[in-house]
Amino acid sequence: MNDAPAETKGTALPEVLPASVLSDDTESFDVVVVGFGIAGGCAALEAARAGARVLLLERAAVHGGTSSMSGGHFYLGGGTAVQQATGHPDSAEEMYKYLIATSKDPEPDKIRAYCEGSVEHFDWVESLGFQFERSYYPEKAVIQPGTQGLMFTGNEKVWPYLNEAVPAPRGHKVPMPGDTEGTKLVMDLLRERVDEAGVQARYETGATNLVVDPAGAVVGLAWRSFGDTGVVAAGSVVVAAGGFVMNADMVAAHTPALGSKLFTLGSTYDDGLGIRLGSSVGAELKHMDEPFITAPFYPPSILVKGLIVNKEGQRFVAEDSYHARTSYHVVAQTDSAAYLIVDSEHVENPSMPLAPFLDGYETVEEMEAGLDLPTGSLVATLERYNSFAANGEDPDFHKHPDWLAPQATGPWGVYDLTLGNALYAGFTLGGIRTTVDGEAQREDGSVIRGLYAAGACASNLAQDGAGYCSGTQLGEGSFFGRRAGAAASRARERRE
């Protein structure tokens, strides 16, 4: 259902303009795309390749959007060339079962399309002008340290998901070292392909309002560029303007967990304008209360063999969970407090200490008192963990044997995973309800003719914060961006 918080300046909906603002001499395009991130760029490219006359508006001075700030992972599977080359068999069916299991209120038609189209989409992404390295990185990391083309970027090997779908790594990284250089490469190549296709791109120009005809169809939009304003007629509008993590009022209304204690992952223009444009003409908003929040405590991978406890001295999550899932459960604990405990055989100071090292303790009792945990709680928790870990078992949280090891050799080290002490980062996951082809939908499921949405301002795979897989933003943004652009172009053909 539509979220309906009290309206503030940052949540106010743009005014809807009547079709009478358009005249016979108004500039006109078949498809107008709002936002030149991965989703908007792919939508514009596919629409132009299908024969549409396309205008692409970007508020920033350059292309890229928040996509250019990502780590360069595309979540793809079903038997890609990299999976095959590295000996990791996968199928669309297993990928589908996994994404269904990790999604909140899943939409099977979208997940089915994404999985069955994943190999073709992998080939399409490479056709932009690069190739994923045919190599695999086996360690636990937020992102590969080098140019390795494949790693696990989700909870595929974590219970209970490994019992619901055959695990396979699906995090395909663009072959550039570092966190952002890979996506910059892809966005630069996408810009070249967009230019070649004849898309007219206008920078430092943003949409301000949608234009609607008497039947409720979107037939254009208003724009602003510095002091200049105007309107443009459009056969279809594709909104791909990002999420809302930079809009304090929208965050307070929908995802208050993304408050002042977190580093926000987004660009200046992740202010929710695209979402509010959709809502202004009646689009339903879905999963607006779902944030992605994370504070990785690895690399190094050896830290995963430790155990995480809350203020009650109790474990509450399998420590081999992907970092987003672990963080999701940390935030749910009392005072969002948690501690990672490792013994002297496994302690290691991370090269990028997002979770600060608190202290070392000679005995478990001393550690328990130092952390102000209930008397006897940590002693009992550690004894139970160690006794089962020695046999490669974890009956409480089913941690994978690969990451089980007794933490029995003192002294012990403690890392602070508490929100506000560790460096947590996050962004928003909710957006406009759409069909599998990106058509914006009302609460009753009816389609708003002429309006499409893709990327971070659309709700597609519907993963919640605990089930999010790194790479789905670029993966589904590019995939459903393509579908939205193609569908918008087909709408032009039907009108002709």
Image: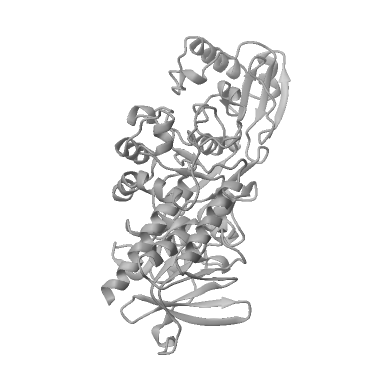
Can residue 232 be seen?
A: yes
Q: Is residue 166 above or below residue 16?
A: above
Give the image location of residue 191, x and y in percent.
52, 61
Can residue 313 be seen?
A: no
Q: Residue at x 45, y 15 (%)?
A: 393
What quarter of the picture does the N terminus occupy? bottom left
Q: Residue at x 58, y 60 (%)?
A: 247
Q: Is residue 437 above or below residue 475?
A: below
Give the image location of residue 428, x and y in percent.
51, 52
Q: How is the image coloured?
A: one colour
Q: Residue at x 49, y 19 (%)?
A: 402
Give the image location of residue 132, x and y in percent.
49, 41
- Based on the displayed image, in which of its 4 quarters is residue 340 positioned? top right
Q: Is residue 139 above or below residue 179?
A: above
Q: Is residue 228 above or below residue 92?
A: below
Q: Is residue 436 left or right of residue 83?
A: left
- Based on the displayed image, in which of its 4 quarters is residue 368 positioned? top right
Give the image location of residue 135, x and y in percent.
50, 32
Q: Residue at x 62, y 41 (%)?
A: 178
What quarter of the picture does the C terminus occupy? bottom left
Which of these two is toward me, 179 or 266? 179
